[in-house]
Amino acid sequence: MSPEELERAARALAPQMVADRRQLHRHPELAGRERETAAYIASRLRDLGLEPRLLLGETAVCADIRGGGGPGRALLVRADIDALPIQERDPERPYRSLSEGVMHACGHDGHVAIALATAELLRERRAEFPGLARLVFQPAEEVAGGAAPMIEAGVMESPPIEGVIGLHLWSGQPVGRVGVRAGTFCASADEFGLEVRGRGGHGALPHQALDPVPIASLVVLGLQTLVSRETSPLESAVVTVGQVSAGQAFNVIPETVLLRGTVRAFTEEDRGRLLRRIGEVGAGIASAFGASVRQIEGPGCPPVVCDPAMAELVRRAAATVPGADVFEPDPLPIGDDVGLFLRRAPGCYFMLGAGDPPRGISAPHHHPDFDIDEACLPLGAQVMTRSALDFLTAGPG
């Protein structure tokens, strides 16, 4: 199939992609609650003549497209489907969220629309390729809690998956830009907690208590040295304390202070070191004042590392798409648990420009004004479909 034929086919699906995206945008669901979203996806796949499977308490969907060209390789195409606890700001947006305090503010609605179009394009052309394309619609990406249970549910098996592709819409790049990078594309992302325990008392008699508030303040400052003094200036990492919780009254010294934050690193070595040192630094500072610290492990995911051969396959595929401008992006400090799939099989996770600053579509991800230029959807379907066809028709890697 020529690039021009694929472009025409994808553009013919543009109205359906917009309709899918807007339906999901109006009805977003948080991580672990994506049952209506999964039901909509499964219904659309059945309309295409596929046999979707609902997984993980019916919050996830998986569907196979078997090629007509005989045995071959198996490819996993992944899209994430959950939304965020954000109140959409624009009351005039015709497809604004109808769920109070919940919004697709990271483009997952667009990811699903592109994956559904990719499924349709591949199904129509299954006589052209051998092997199998497996479409996986994953919940709970925003809390790094969806990829692992999907892998445990067997989506990488029967047959063994040999390649993975996925994309992330990016409002910071204009429509037409396709970012492909070999090696580390996204950082690890881990949640941590430190409970600093002192001894409560009267706010007017601090000498009779062991105030954990100033101790916790010193812990926050001490954690910053893990990047500024313990991480090589040639490497990148982030330690952010985003939540401090303590006390219930202004004149009472609390028993405990809870610090919650996030750690980002681009290597597994830095990831492990930072998580270990957070507990050590917290305990050391607290013990100097006679207090104690309990470290609380939160959810997390490893860096997203793209296989060089798979990245080259996607880069070549994108270069054939009319209007695509392929570039190599810098690594992103955001996290994405697609990295767990890429640990199990070589894959490529790429960036698709979705912004349009002249039209005001430039708000960052996880922002109440976030939006995408829907002109990116047919282009994304073309890159995904061409990459899938090239992988499946290439024979053993």
Image (spheres, rainbow, N blue to C red):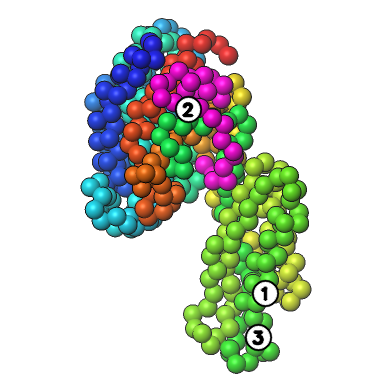
Label 1 neighbourhood size at 10 Å, few (<14), some (14-19), many (20+)? Answer: many
The residue carrying mark 3 is 209
Q: Earlier in the sequence, mark 3 or mark 2?
A: 3
In this picture, residue 227 sits left or right of residue 25 = right
- Residue type at mark 1 is Ile
Camera-side residue of 177 and 69: 177
Q: Position of residue 336 (x, y in %)?
A: 52, 42
Q: CA distance from mark 3 to mark 1?
A: 13 Å
Q: Earlier in the sequence, mark 1 or mark 2?
A: 1
Camera-side residue of 247 and 381: 381
Q: Are discs 3 and 2 less than 8 Å apart at CB?
A: no
SS assignment at label 3: loop
SS assignment at label 2: strand
Q: Is residue 332 magenta?
A: yes
Q: Earlier in the sequence, mark 3 or mark 1?
A: 3
Residue that protrudes farthest toward the bottom in the picture: 204
Magenta region, residue range: 311-336
Q: Position of residue 32 (x, y in %)?
A: 39, 47
3 vs 2, front mark: 2
The residue carrying mark 2 is 325
Q: CA distance from mark 3 to mark 2?
A: 63 Å
Q: Is residue 185 magenta?
A: no
Q: Which mark is residue 215?
A: 1
Camera-side residue of 75 and 177: 177
3 vs 1, front mark: 1
Camera-side residue of 350 and 65: 350
Quadrant holding the N terminus:
top left
Q: Position of residue 4 (x, y in %)?
A: 36, 15
Inspect this view and state whether residue 352 appears: yes
Quadrant holding the C terminus:
top right
